[in-house]
Amino acid sequence: MHGDTTRQRIKFSDDRVCKSHLLNCCPHDVLSGTRMDLGECLKVHDLALRADYEIASKEQDFFFELDAMDHLQSFIADCDRRTEVAKKRLAETQEEISAEVAAKAERVHELNEEIGKLLAKVEQLGAEGNVEESQKVMDEVEKARAKKREAEEVYRNSMPASSFQQQKLRVCEVCSAYLGLHDNDRRLADHFGGKLHLGFIEIREKLEELKRVVAEKQEKRNQERLKRREEREREEREKLRRSRSHSKNPKRYVLHKISSEAVFFKGSFYRLNIFSK
């Protein structure tokens, strides 16, 4: 249901249109082409409808942020559930180790993440032509590599070789992918600078933004409703006050002269003025 034919039949406000797409945050778009490609969205995606919405939203608030927030919340909740399942499955295949040893393994993972993120930044700066800044970040990478080698040695010496091999995996909290304790720099850079990981970061950050926007708009609407209710109550009190005021002062009738007639009484003519209320 995409394209020119669809656009001729519906408007962007139609329930069949994906509101997340209108706000440029539908997971089906963001994760397209990754190993978690979701395929085509069940709702209509059309760039022309998005353009129509962007123009119209300057004059009217359609509050589509609420629909998009619900969509992303559901998607992220499913992702987090998958992450927990993967972590549980991983834990079941690994031997129990002491908290101290687990902390040492965690340190290696943390340094892996740091190296991966720094390498992704180096590549981005290089693509932008910022050679000087790229070299500074590369120096940070070398320092992190040295720390990682030390952490690996400390971890390796703290447990038997068999257990050392079993503790080599970890689940990424952002995108639920598996990370290896001994992943090389290239793999780390590919992960943290990859479309899948960055896509999940984008979705999670957009969700937090939508939560803030929805909360602000709901608060504004609540304040407007409260103001309208107070105005109605004030008007009703004023009507009641006027009504009570009239009941304390009965309506006085005014006599209006409407005609006069001449009458004969006891031998003389008199003019009689006739009044009505």
Image (spheres, helix red, strand yellow):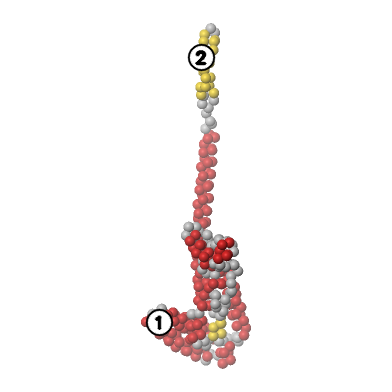
Q: Up-down: is 226 above or below 135? A: above
Q: Secondary structure at mark 1?
A: helix
Marking on residue 203: none
Instruction: Return the x and y of residue 159 as percentages of the image width and height.
Output: 55, 90
Earlier in the chain: of badge 2 and badge 1, it is 1
Marking on residue 134: 1
Q: Is residue 99 visible?
A: no
Q: As shown in the figure, which amino acid type bears the numbered disc 2?
A: Arg
Q: Secondary structure at mark 2?
A: strand
Q: Residues within 10 Å of mark 1 (few under 14, many from 20)?
A: many
Instruction: Return the x and y of residue 34 as percentages of the image width and height.
Output: 55, 78
Instruction: Return the x and y of residue 81 as percentages of the image width and height.
Output: 60, 75
Q: Up-down: is 33 above or below 161? A: above
Q: Residues within 10 Å of mark 2 (few under 14, many from 20)?
A: few
* Displayed quadrant of residue 28: bottom right
- State how far apart marks 2 and 1 are (Cα): 116 Å
Q: Is residue 145 visible?
A: yes
Residue under the point 62% across and 81% down: 89
- Front-lying residue, 169 or 104: 169
Residue under the point 51% across and 14% down: 271
* Displayed quadrant of residue 101: bottom right
Q: As shown in the figure, which amino acid type bears the numbered disc 1?
A: Ser
- Residue matched to label 2: 271
